[in-house]
Structures are given as C-alpha cells and as structure tokens.
Image (cartoon, rainbow, N blue to C red):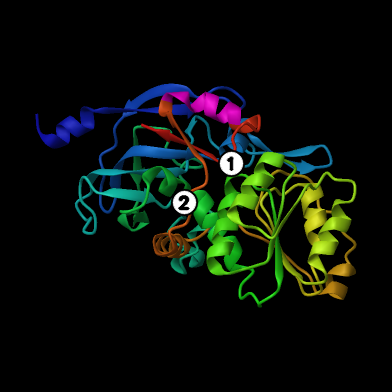
Amino acid sequence: MSALAQSQSATTSSWRLNVSCEALVPTEEARPVPQGREVLMKVTHCGVCHSDLHIREGKYNIGGGKSLDLVQRGLKLPLTLGHEILGTVEAVGPDVTTVKAGQRRLVHTWVGCGECELCASGDENLCAKPRFHGVQARGGFADHVLVPDEKFLVDVDGLDPAVAATYACSGVTIYSAIQKILPHRDGEKVAVFGCGGLGQTALQLLKALGVGPVIAVDPSPEKRKQAEAIGVAATLDPNAPDAAKQLAAFADGKLAASLDFVGSEDTSALAINAVRKGGVVILVGLYGGELRYALPFFPMRALTVRGSYVGSLKELKEFIALARKVNLPSIPIEKRPMNQVNQALDDLAAGKVAGRIVLEA
C-alpha cells in the first residue's frame, strides 16, 4: 500500500462536542491528507480556555437576563474544541516550502477567509467569515489538526511547549490588548482587572515593558498574592465596600488605562470610572452583562472604551520574539492528559484553576 493510501485509510481521534452543555465525546474520524499549502499537525499540547466554556455552553451572557445563542449565530455542531494548539509537523501538502515533518510549531488559530480586505491586511482575526480552530474548524482537543496554510505555523523552539501553547490565545490576546494602551508615559498608572491566567501574564508583560505602576484587581486573595509576587504596586479586592474609593486613591488622577480581563458589569463600571480624563479602557474578558454609563461623560471625559479580540499573526510573532528576549516568567501551568478534558473544563468553570490547564496528547 502506498504512503498516500495508508494516510487516507488512517484515522485520528478527537474529543467532540455533539450537544451544547454536554460532555465532550471521544470520536474517531478519517485522518486528513494535506493538500496545497496545508499542513497536518500532530497535537502534543492544547490549552484550555474560558472561551471553550462558552462554546460548550453554547451561549454568552449579554445582560438583562438575555444570552447570545451561539448555535443560532452559526456555531455548527458537532465540533472539536481547543484553540491553543502546539504540535509537530506530521505531513505537508505538495506546495509547502517552509516547514517539514518533525518540526515543532505553534498554530495561529485565528484564521480568516483569506479573501477580504481585513485578511489581506493581516487582520484575519477580525474577518467576518472566520475559520478559527476550535470554533468554526476542527480544534486541538484531538490527535491531529489540519492547518490551512503553512504561514499560520510559528516557530517556538527554545520555549517550554506547555507554556507556548497558551500563547496562541492568551499570549497574543494580552499582547494585542496592551498594544492598544501604548505608548505609556512615565508615572502614569494602569489597572488590571482579573488576575487569572490572562491577568497574570498581562502583569508580567507590563512589568517587562516597563509600564506602570500597576494595580491588580481580583476578589481572590490567592490571586492577589500571586499578583504581589509578580511585583505590582498594589492590589485591590473589588468586592470591598470601599473598592471604588481605594482605587481612586491609588489612581490619584493618573490612571491612564484599565485592562479588563473579566468583562463583567461590575469590573467594566469600576474600570471606566477609575481612569483619568483621556483615559483608555480595554475590554477583553467575555464574562458578560451590559455596560450602563451616562453618554455625556464619554465626550466630557474624552474616554476611549475599546474591545480587543485575540490578535493577528503579526502580533503573535512579535509576542513570541518578546517572550524569547525577556524570558517571561511562567504562570502556573497544570498539565493533564488529553482524556481529562471534560474534568479540566469543569474545574475551570468552577474557578478551581489558579493559572492555566494545558492538555498533553
């Protein structure tokens, strides 16, 4: 039997979501054969993200007792989740020239249609017809994933593969969000809301870039201690009765930016009220709810409130280069076997994860 015939008859396994809110189910499928510039990756690591929870639940909370139904919005089941994918090249299409079998690569998940102006400009993460792994296309909770073009593979040699896997989403998301508050003037302050996996990495990156002083805001005493260990100027419990007063005292009129990695009604309100005139609020988290704020205050305070969604391939490469250069300290990484994916999702939903979970194949 030829190598092509063998590959066509081979199978691959994945953990697939068949019905919203139910457990992922192990599934066998035919192993794809790469064509053109496609690359078949053997998955070795895949991070578990809060977005995976939203996809499993099939909805986002949009406030007022309402939710955004993802299936009604075009999410197609069954679907293999997982979008923080790292692995080794197993097979390549005939037109591939930059990678070869056996090389370790990180997958840039945020793939667009490849035809629109946004894709042509490199902003495929903003494409109106996305093909994101683990969202619209087969994801990394699997043995293999087929990458549509070799350009979406990023060299991460020299980095811890379990940590580097998280860079495909959390890393590039944080880097892209921070780029939106730069340049930073000396002495201006920044507030980071949410000190889980995203927030902790953001604190480390802000420190590496010399941005600050920074205040870390999180209701968890453990996560505030972790933020203190990173070296923030102050921490704050947002549930404290005088939280707004404490934040205002820290800000002292110099809080130039708020980075909200939670995205709840409470955190967004606190983030907006705390920044100075001309301040910038970047909303990253997808916890959900509604933003209620008197419209005249936006022009009167010259506020910028901006969403930030993952990041571009260019930003991912820049972040990887920065991670190599400054040797970013690793946030807590808990490695688990791929067959524990359902328990990992449950633990993340229950708030039992201090840093990040990375599944290993």
Q: CA distance from mark 2 to mark 1?
A: 14 Å
Residue 255, horizontal then vertical, whole percent: 76, 68
Query: Relative to residue 28, is residue 144 depicted above or below?
Result: below
- Pointer 2 and pointer 1: residues touching (CB < 8 Å)? no
The overriding secondary structure of the stretch rendered in magenta is: helix
Q: Is residue 162 left or right of residue 192?
A: left
Q: Is residue 17 visible?
A: no
- Depth check: 42 or 354 in front? 354
Residue 124, horizontal then vertical, whole percent: 48, 59
- Depth check: 131 or 321 in front? 321
Query: What amino acid type should be assigned to the residue bearing mark 1?
Result: Ser
Q: Residue at x 41, y 62 (%)?
A: 317
Q: Residue at x 67, y 36 (%)?
A: 59
Q: Residue at x 71, y 68 (%)?
A: 189
Residue receiving disc 2: 167
Residue 50, horizontal then vertical, whole percent: 59, 40
The magenta stretch spans which residues? 339-347
Q: Residue at x 52, y 46 (%)?
A: 331
Categorize mark 1 by other alpha carbons within 10 Å: few (<14), some (14-19), many (20+): some
